Amino acid sequence: EELLASIPDDMERGSVFISYSHDDMPTAATPAVGLKAAGIPVWLDKRRLNPGGDWEQALKRAVKSRAALFLSLISTATESNPDRFVHEERKWAAEVHVPGEIFYIPVIIDGTTHPAREPAVFSHLHRHTLSGGIVTSDFASLLRRYLDQYHRDGEVRDV
């Protein structure tokens, strides 16, 4: 709870953007807290940003110009409806995707077996599974290596 509360309202450049369906908030908080506890800067929209603010533009800016990595949490909720806002975030991620670089990381958090709603450009990517959103030490280490490369080189190469 305290770690979740410590996630800033405005996303810091170079953070991991966590994209999720608001139906999944309790589960989405689990990887956010797990990664933050591992020293990885994360950001997720906890409350549709500030009243009076243009939350859609703020989210678009976070995805397109501030995120080092985009963690796409895949679940029954994200798969159930193509009109959920989460799919808009994923379209923005597809717009900034550079072939040969790692940016978009699809993560299944429940029993979803054949996700079909991720942007087509990402359909070939290896998906991770974090049951219940629980971050493993291997997954945290992988993201830390990606972020180290991002901060050193300005990109994460898929080599």
Image: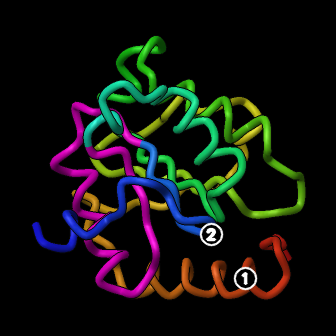
Please tell me the numbered disc located at residue 22.
none
Above or below, 91 against 109 in this view is above
> In which quadrant of the rendered view does residue 132 lie?
bottom left
Q: Residues within 10 Å of mark 2 (few under 14, many from 20)?
A: some
Q: Which amino acid lies under the numbered mark 1 shown in the image of this protein?
A: His
Helix, strand or loop at label 2? It is loop
In depth, the one of 61 and 124 nearer the eye is: 61
Above or below, 33 against 52 in this view is below
Proximity of marks 2 and 1: CB atoms separated by less than 8 Å: yes
Q: Quadrant of the C terminus?
A: bottom right
Q: What residue is pinned by disc 2? A: 14
Q: What residue is pinned by disc 1? A: 151
In depth, the one of 7 and 23 nearer the eye is: 7
Q: Quadrant of the N terminus?
A: bottom left
In depth, the one of 118 and 61 nearer the eye is: 61
Q: Is residue 41 magenta?
A: yes
**Is residue 87 found left or right of 32 in the rendered image?**
right
Numbered circles on residues, count:
2
Residue 65 x, y percent position in the rendering: 71, 51
- Residue interval drawn in magenta: 20-46
Q: Is residue 36 magenta?
A: yes
Q: Which amino acid lies under the numbered mark 2 shown in the image of this protein?
A: Gly
Residue 138 x, y percent position in the rendering: 45, 85
Residue 39 x, y percent position in the rendering: 40, 87
> In which quadrant of the rendered view does residue 85 lie?
top left
